[in-house]
Image (cartoon, rainbow, N blue to C red):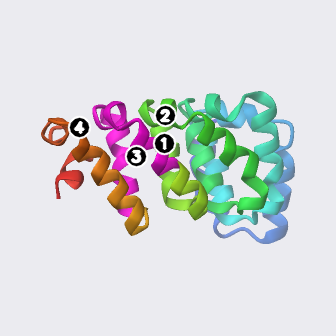
């Protein structure tokens, strides 16, 4: 998975016909792990997920989950990026198991250097019931989440994308812990919480 060839493919994907994209997708079958693990190939896969119908690329998620569980993929340097695109573009029905698995491990993922990016996208794009559950998990673990650089980034997304009642729940959880709000000021996302 040559760097130059991957850059060229990324640029061409948006101009490809549906037939050309299907051909490219078929070439990926059985090689998803190799592409995800590639520092350059994963960008091609992300681009395909942006431009192709999720139905045509559902095998990507299946192959990824056959290789590793969702929480492991979310903590993978490149796997997290591909999961982000899947969360952005796939419908709830096709990723329900993925959403459930990510929620089950939400606390750890919110604190992880790569997993937090997946949880930020989860906060933005997951159905409202899933987002609400994630916000409840964050509220229940506020000291750990708000005291962590990565956790604050997910908390910031909750304060931005949550419903009004969910945002109030987060703010109450922050204010409930004496000294937590001032300590957040130096962390990413802390400025949003203070505002």
Residue 2, compared with residue 49, is above or below; it is above
Question: Label 3 vs label 2: CA separation?
Answer: 10 Å
Q: Which residue is mark 3?
A: 154
Image side of residue 55 versus residue 168, left or right: right
Indicate which label's residue lies in the foreground, 4 or 1: 4
Answer whether residue 9 is visible to the viewer in this image.
Answer: no
Which quadrant does the C terminus fall into? bottom left
167 drawn magenta: no
Q: Which residue is mark 1?
A: 137
Q: Residue drawn 43% across and 67% down? A: 163
Indicate which label's residue lies in the foreground, 1 or 2: 1
Pinpoint residue 137: horizontal percent, then vertical percent: 48, 42
Pinpoint residue 10: horizontal percent, then vertical percent: 60, 54
**Residue 48 occupies which quadrant of the picture?**
bottom right
N-terminal label among 1 and 3: 1
Indicate which label's residue lies in the foreground, 4 or 3: 4
N-terminal label among 4 and 3: 3
Question: Label 1 vs label 3: CA separation?
Answer: 11 Å
Q: Which residue is mark 2?
A: 107
Q: Which residue is mark 4?
A: 177
Count of marks, rendered view: 4
Question: Label 4 vs label 3: CA separation?
Answer: 18 Å
Question: Label 1 vs label 2: CA separation?
Answer: 7 Å
Pinpoint residue 31: horizontal percent, then vertical percent: 80, 36
* Element under disc 3: helix
Q: Nearer the viewer, residue 51 or 83?
A: 83
Pinpoint residue 27: horizontal percent, then vertical percent: 84, 46
């Amino acid at each position: 998975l040559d760097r130059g060839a991957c850059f060229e493919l990324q640029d061409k994907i948006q101009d490809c016909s549906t037939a050309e994209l299907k051909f490219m997708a078929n070439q990926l079958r059985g090689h998803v792990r190799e592409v995800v693990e590639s520092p350059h190939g994963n960008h091609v896969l992300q681009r395909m997920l942006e431009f192709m119908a999720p139905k045509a690329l559902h095998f990507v998620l299946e192959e990824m989950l056959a290789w590793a569980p969702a929480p492991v993929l979310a903590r993978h340097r490149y796997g997290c990026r591909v999961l982000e695109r899947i969360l952005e573009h796939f419908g709830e029905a096709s990723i329900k198991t993925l959403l459930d698995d990510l929620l089950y491990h939400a606390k750890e993922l919110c604190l992880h250097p790569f997993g937090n990016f997946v949880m930020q996208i989860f906060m933005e794009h997951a159905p409202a019931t899933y987002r609400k559950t994630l916000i409840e998990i964050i509220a229940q673990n506020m000291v750990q989440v708000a005291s962590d650089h990565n956790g604050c980034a997910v908390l910031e997304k909750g304060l931005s994308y949550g419903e009004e009642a969910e945002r109030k729940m987060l703010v109450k959880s922050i204010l409930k812990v004496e000294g937590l709000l001032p300590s957040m000021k130096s962390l990413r996302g802390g400025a949003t919480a203070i505002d």
